[in-house]
Image (cartoon, rainbow, N blue to C red):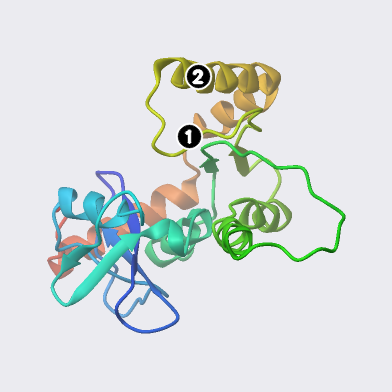
Amino acid sequence: MGEHPQVSAVSAIVNRGLPLKAYVFRNYRLTPGVRSHYLGDCKYKMWQAIRASSAAPGYFQEFVLGKDLHQDGGLLINNPTALAIHECKCLWPNTPLQCVLSLGTGRYETAGKNGTTYTSLKAKLTNVISSATDTEEVHTMLDALLPPDTYFRFNPYMSEDIALHESRAEKLNFLKAEGERYLERNEYKLRKAASVLGREKSKVQRVAEWAKLKADMYKGLPLISKL
């Protein structure tokens, strides 16, 4: 367990009734007796995990695995940072977090209107979807709860709303330039995150990982990624 990165991807199961169920594709197994809050397994291939977790409605068809119908995990968990922390606690329950790095895809905020006229159905649905897939609420919560110099979030404001399916070179170059300007403005924060990530693991972390590795070897759990 301790010799390779622990990686996961999340999808949304849409055919098990409401509310929708999050499903975590893992390249690791949890220790017997430890249960994650989320459904999931490590029995699938990498391409299946990618296909299921990226099946965004309107862009890719739902993906069938067994008896489940999977769509993009962003329908439920568009910012999976809290899920990742939960999974870490399942893997290493007694190990303190050293660094949590959250990378956003950029955000664009439209100007609000103060009028009280009724909106169209299309506008209402757009607002509901936008709110349901918001990523910043999770960020606000984690920023308040996690220890200082442990949690870092990078998510630039965009001066233009770029569609998910955009492929024009000039628009992609625009996104690149926006990202570069954001990093220049946040150079200190970036250097701080790099410094924390570069620290050696504490003795508590090393001992915990060593103990878990030995326990998994003793129990015969797989030590190599299946994804």
Q: Which of 125 and 81 is in front in this view?
A: 125
C-alpha gap between disc 1 and disc 2:
32 Å
Q: Tag 1's secondary structure?
A: loop
- Disc number placed over residue 3 in the picture, else none: none
Q: Within 10 angstroms of label 1, few (less than 14), some, or many (20 or more) residues?
A: few
**Residue lying furthest bottom:** 17
**Residue type at tag 2:** Lys
Q: Mark 1 or mark 2, which is nearer to you?
A: 2
Asked whether residue 224 is in view, the answer is no
Residue at left 16%, top 67%? 65
Residue at left 48%, top 21%? 171
Q: Tag 2's secondary structure?
A: helix
Residue 192 picture location, percent across and down: 64, 28
- Disc number placed over residue 200 in the picture, else none: 1
Residue 194 picture location, percent across and down: 55, 27
- Above or below, 201 relative to 139: above
- Relative to 141, 213 lies left or right: left
- Relative to 161, 112 lies left or right: right
Which residue position holds label 2? 176
Residue 30 picture location, percent across and down: 29, 68
Asked whether residue 2 is in view, the answer is yes
**Residue type at tag 1:** Glu
Q: Within 10 angstroms of label 2, few (less than 14), some, or many (20 or more) residues?
A: few
